[in-house]
Amino acid sequence: MNRADRVVLAVDLGTGGPKVGFVALDGTVLWSDLVAVPTSYGPGGAAVQDAGLWWAIIRDATRRGLAESRVRGDQVAGVSITGQWASTVPVDADGRPVGPCVMWMDTRGAPFSRKAFGGRLQGYRPRALLSWLRRNGGIPSPSGDDPVGHMLHLQHNDPAVSGAARWYLEPVDYLSMCFTGRAAASRASMMGAWLTDNRNLALPDYDDVLVRLAGIDRTKLPPLVPTGSIIATVAPAVAAELGISPAAQVVTGTPDLHSAAVGSGAVRQGELHLTISTTSWISCPVAVKKTDAFHQLATVPGLDPSSYLLVNNQDTAGRALQWLRDNVFGELDYDALTALAAGAPAGSNGVIFTPWLKGEHSPIDDRNARGGFHNLSLDTTRADLVRAVLEGVAFNSRWLLECVNRFTGNDGPIRIVGGGARSDLWCQIIADVCGRTCERVADPLNAQLRGAALFAGIGMGDVDRDELRDLIPLDGVFEPIAANRAVYDRLFAEFPGLYTAQKAMFARLAR
């Protein structure tokens, strides 16, 4: 079969639930569906999901997708999982969850993380900080909202789950195990644990020094295999249940950062992509290991065993618009909201929105930071408020982009992906605020699903990474509008200072 006839079963597991799709190896999305799952919040910073529910949804969606898309089961040549990272699924030896998935925003491990490596140097003990930055490039958070914090929480607060767990898996690795029966991870999928020595990407295991500093049980860490390699074929019983080929190969799971890079086509050194999803980030392939600890930028194991990707994260992007819709403009959908915003002038008549509704990671690391509207007046309109949210996310991106430019020089166009990129207005605002040409990938909402499939194609030898930029279609190019630059420069000059002026207040009110 040619590439158009060979299909990958791709899963993009977002925080909101799994998106399941069939994607041809020429990049065509043949069918997809998203099924929402709830996050349960509890005392002490708890945030969990039912990982078993993910797998039930994926099984049902796969069977339904075969029926609705007319894809034949024997066309399915590969399986690829992408999605959220820095969450933790405790499973038994057969891959069955023995407790809920501890989500990336769960902070119950914070007391144990602070005890293990916390201190006064940017929240860390100096020796621990230096060891992590030298060996890995990143470091677990004393806030506990990462796999090390999760593992410490289970170890100390939930001995029943900890005792029953054979492996602590990232969500993408858990789902890969559901398909294959084999526990396996890669440097890429485990990047959020910060437990590998990234000075030499050829080393096949976790770093003894970092594991000891973290204080976790090494025996529960899944074995590492090369990024982009084939884990196994689909288990025969699973293939029969789903109706797909038992010869389908399962490639290592990837964080959404990696699948977004592939799905954007920005896979050569210095080629930027920007994601406007629930969260937002700006990334590009980087040649060497590097860290900017002051602005929470680092390189992590990249798209293959010999490369790196820039990692950072802005915690609230599309989620800010969702918050506005749900709490202020409940009668309007997203299209109506952006149409309303188009009625306000560039600069929202001087209104500035700071989008730190759940704290921030990059370019400032402050979980206490909170959002707000600034410079409101009696003349402020509903349109001003909505446009200010779109512009506030763009100002945050420009702030991060300035740090990215210092970290790794680049001046080319920025590929944009993610659900927020469906809005022409939002893409134009980002181009105007950042002063950069922005290229929107066609069907940006499915860019990560497409990226997961093409990542599998690379692993199976059907796709060459060098052809990806030309293989990914665009459906819009947004050039900065010169007339808007002075307005946005004036407002952005105030933006970082709003954080500086309120930082102490955020800390006081968080007590």
Image (cartoon, rainbow, N blue to C red):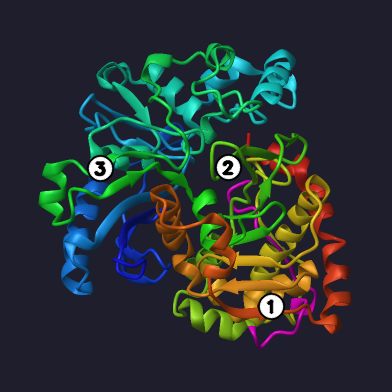
Q: Quadrant of residue 490?
A: bottom right
The residue wearing badge 1 is 428
Callout 1 environment at 10 Å: few (<14), some (14 to 19), or many (20+)?
many
Nearest to the eye among marks 1 and 3: give it.
Answer: 3
Q: Which residues are magenta?
A: 342-359
Which numbered marker is on residue 302? 2
Q: CA distance from mark 1 to mark 3?
A: 44 Å
Residue beneath the point at 53% across and 69% down? 472
Callout 3 environment at 10 Å: few (<14), some (14 to 19), or many (20+)?
many
Q: Check disc 1 and give the amino acid type.
A: Gln
Nearest to the eye among marks 3 and 2: give it.
Answer: 3
Asked if residue 80 lies left or right of residue 284, the reply is left
Q: Is residue 111 above or below residue 325?
A: above
Residue beneath the point at 65% across and 50% down? 370
The residue wearing badge 3 is 233
Q: Quadrant of residue 407?
A: top right
Report the magenta stretch's main SS: loop
Asked if residue 422 lies left or right of residue 360, the reply is left
Residue 37 falls within the magenta-colored stretch: no
Provide the secondary structure element on which disc 1 rests: helix
